[in-house]
Amino acid sequence: MNLFDVYPLIPVTLVKAEGSKLWDDQGQEYLDLYGGHAVISIGHTHPHYVKRIKDQLDQIAFYSNSIQIPIQKEFADKLGHLSCLHSYQLFLCNSGAEANENAIKMASFETGKSGFIAFTGSFHGRTSGAVALTDNPKIIAPCNAREDFHILPWGDLDAVEETLKTNTIAGILIEGIQGVGGIQVPSVEFLLGISALAKKYTAKLILDEVQSGYGRTGRFFAHQWVEGVMPDLITMAKGMGNGFPIGGLLISPEFKASYGLLGTTFGGNHLACAAGLAVLEVLEAEKLQSKALDLGEKLIEELKQIPGITDVRGKGLMIGIDLDRDAGPVRTELVKKYHIFTGSAAKKQTIRLLPPLSVDWNQLNSFLVALKEILSN
């Protein structure tokens, strides 16, 4: 049986990982500055993470949500503490797309409306509702297209208000920082304006923090850089489990839970919660959030000095680098000659950096040296 092709594959077979380092089956070492689509948050095979999961396996790996699972409450308490969002309610699922699907559903339940707003450059997932609010027609099947789902220009508050005036909009979905869109950071004015308009027209504000959450930007969630923004719903995944599939939805206290409204088979299972707790414990103990901020600021300043780079955007260790040429050959050269993994973006001139938060300055500096050499040639 053949595998269904999903991505163009880098011809490397990885067999070992530690921290920000990877090794292939030939013994070649690589530097991971992409984290497998921003998934690796605390570093590959962190010993505390590995122990947490092994210990949980020795006790119980899974049972459904039809019974009490105390580790879920332990996880929720720790998440509330580190995110400073104690009053929110937590629904656990398995992925970012699933988190966004449930956020869309909750906003629609609460408002009785079916329309939604998202923005150019957005990526929210590949499931039915999430992909309909993603700005990529190539991955939206005819069955996903929805007339009352609107993709509006990034930064255009007038377009948002005009659409809200139709009184059909249940929610506005926006990324804390756009990832696939090329690390586009919403301005303070734009995010505050959206928040105010959502309240004015009784639409729900949904912050997609799937890629931008979990300390990556120097705040627990990227929207927390803007004082006064309190989303109705916050979605998360990726770095949440450091490689173990887990997603989540934070639901503001204004929403009232009722049995059967949301549900999941695998979400919040014992192993997933053990992985999630380990991530939070390491984030706190090793102060990875402030480390991400310090390293990111230093890296951005160094990148701005390199000829051939036209723009650098981002916060913390979520960075977009625009080149004066196609980034594809540059990324290929980084892998082949310098053994460094980086990410792409929707814009072909952009390199996306989403390294494990355990990365150190010497490793980042080796990337700077390699990029300078490639661009100078």
Image (spheres, rainbow, N blue to C red):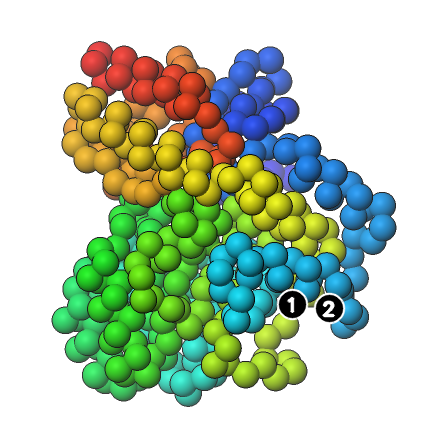
Residue 372 lies in quadrant: top left
Count of numbered labels shown in the rendering: 2
* Relative side of 73 to 128, left or right: right
The disc at residue 76 is none
- Between residue 206 and residue 266, name the one nearer to us: 206
Q: Which kind of residue does numbered mark 2 sit on? A: Asn
- SS of the residue under disc 2: loop
In contact (CB < 8 Å): disc 2 and disc 1: yes
359 above or below 23? below
Q: Residue at x 49, y 64 (%)?
A: 85
Where residue 357 appears, x then y in whole percent?
Answer: 48, 36
Where residue 268 appears, x then y in whole percent?
Answer: 67, 60
The residue most toward the left is: 158
Please state, as top left, top right, bottom left or bottom right, where the C terminus lies in the image.
top left
Q: Residue at x 31, y 30 (%)?
A: 298
Mark 1: give few (<14), some (14-19) or many (20+) Cα within 10 Å: some
Q: Where is mark 1, residue-wise?
A: 264
18 above or below 5? above
Q: Where is mark 2, residue-wise?
A: 65
Q: Residue at x 42, y 54 (%)?
A: 221
Residue 248 lies in quadrant: bottom right
Single out the mark in the foreground, 2 or 1: 2
Q: Give the alpha-carbon distance from disc 2 to disc 1, as whole Å.
A: 8 Å
Where residue 259 appears, x then y in whole percent?
Answer: 65, 82
- Regarding residue 344, the answer to whether it shows in the image is no
